[in-house]
Image (cartoon, coloured by chain):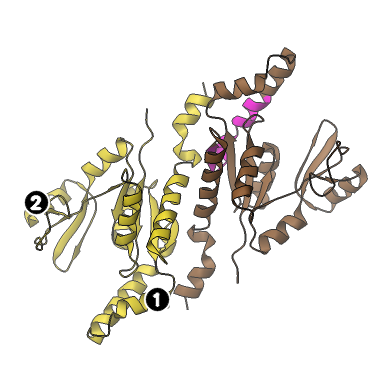
Chain colours: A brown, B yellow
């Protein structure tokens, strides 16, 4: 029998580069999967159903909420976003490690349903660097920049709900650190009950 | 200010190869230190004071016990063995990672004094392999082999007090996994309070 895969929840303020780090990890470790979210927002040019998102009608999404078919869901800018449970559970059962790249609110929902998940918070090397990245090229309206910073600060204030801080100073280094977390978590005693049972308790 | 170093407690049944794995880790990572134990047993040819052990008289050892100068100590075969506290604490304060390669009884004492320590249990790939290694070449008296196996079984029955199982199938791989544990533990949120304070809470 195989051990279950790891559920890896990755959050962090926008500007931390979490998507880039996950992509770099999967290039080095193609056995790691990324969960595809569902959304009610319309596809943008070039986006494909089942690749970037599962694009659903609002009615479908609402009925999935009622049937508890989401691990987590939220509504941003009048669009729904969520992580369908079935696919993720199938992958985990098959021993695959699955990344959920989600917002802090979503991560909190996952924690209550999958306490054994691994929670990783991606940060740029410093708050100054984050502010620089969020301020952009100075072409955005000050209100937009101020709101982004406020959201980032709220997200960061939840860092202590996570297990690990993954500093994205350089993408390839951050991806290696991410791989070390996966390797290490698989060695945790509580994830090796089957090995212990088979080798030490018979 | 620097983060404190990690206290890495390494145990495992004799025959698991924990000494070899620690040595291989330190060859790849010379910045990791190994704590030198104190003992009242006499030096064997080739052993040097302060390198293999601190060789002490029984009276000195007893007075150190009374003065709480050991992190852990035990008496085996009428000789005392223990880990002097001062040196380990100095290294940790200086940000150095320190390995204690100690017996299960000692590890339990460390856990109550250093709950933040990382507990690693080294195992051969299977119980059959361990039995093979402990049986030796079949030249030992059956009572000696039986006692070794009994001790190994008692040690293994304590595996769930540890954080990680480190399987020593091949020394170089096991040393790499050990390095991944160190790298990962340094990313734990609770070990990054200083970074969080400096970057997120001012």
The boundaries of the magenta stretch are A151-166
- Relative to B135, is A161 on the left or the right? right
Mark 2, chain letter? B
**Along the viewing direction, whichever of A88 and B17 lies nearer the viewer:** B17
Q: Is residue B159 left or right of residue B57?
A: right
Instruction: Tell me the residue that label 1 is attached to.
Output: B129
Is A164 inside the magenta-drawn segment?
yes
- Element class at badge 1: helix
Task: Residue under label 2, please give it.
Answer: B60
Q: Nearer the viewer, mark 1 or mark 2?
A: 1
Q: Secondary structure at mark 2?
A: helix
Q: Quadrant of residue B138?
A: bottom left
Circle 2 packing at 10 Å, graded few (<14), some (14-19), many (20+), is: few
Q: CA distance from mark 1 to mark 2?
A: 41 Å
Name the residue rendered at 56%, 23% in the picture. A129
Compared with B82, A139 (above or below) is: above
Magenta segment: does it hold A178?
no
| Residue B22 position within the rendered picture, expressed as x and y whole percent measured from the top left | 32, 56
Query: Is A58 left, or right, of A126 in this rendering?
Result: right
């Amino acid at each position: 029998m195989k051990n279950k895969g790891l559920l890896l929840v990755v959050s962090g303020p926008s500007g931390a580069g979490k998507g880039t780090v996950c992509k770099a990890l999967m290039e080095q470790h193609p056995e790691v999967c990324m969960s595809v979210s569902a959304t009610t927002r319309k596809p943008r040019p070039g986006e494909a159903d089942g690749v970037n998102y599962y694009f659903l009608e609002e009615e479908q999404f609402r009925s999935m909420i009622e049937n508890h078919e989401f691990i987590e869901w939220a509504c941003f800018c009048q669009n729904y976003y969520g992580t369908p449970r079935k696919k993720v559970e199938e992958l985990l059962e098959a021993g695959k490690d699955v990344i959920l790249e989600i917002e802090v609110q979503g991560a909190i929902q996952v924690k209550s349903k999958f306490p054994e998940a691994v929670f990783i918070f991606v940060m740029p090397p410093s708050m100054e660097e984050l502010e620089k990245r969020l301020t952009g090229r100075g072409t955005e309206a000050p209100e937009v920049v101020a709101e982004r910073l406020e959201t980032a600060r709220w997200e960061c204030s939840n860092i202590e709900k996570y297990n690990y801080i993954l500093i994205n100073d350089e993408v390839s280094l951050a991806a290696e650190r991410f791989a070390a977390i996966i390797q290490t978590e698989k060695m945790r005693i509580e994830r090796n009950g089957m090995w212990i049972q088979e080798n030490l308790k018979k």
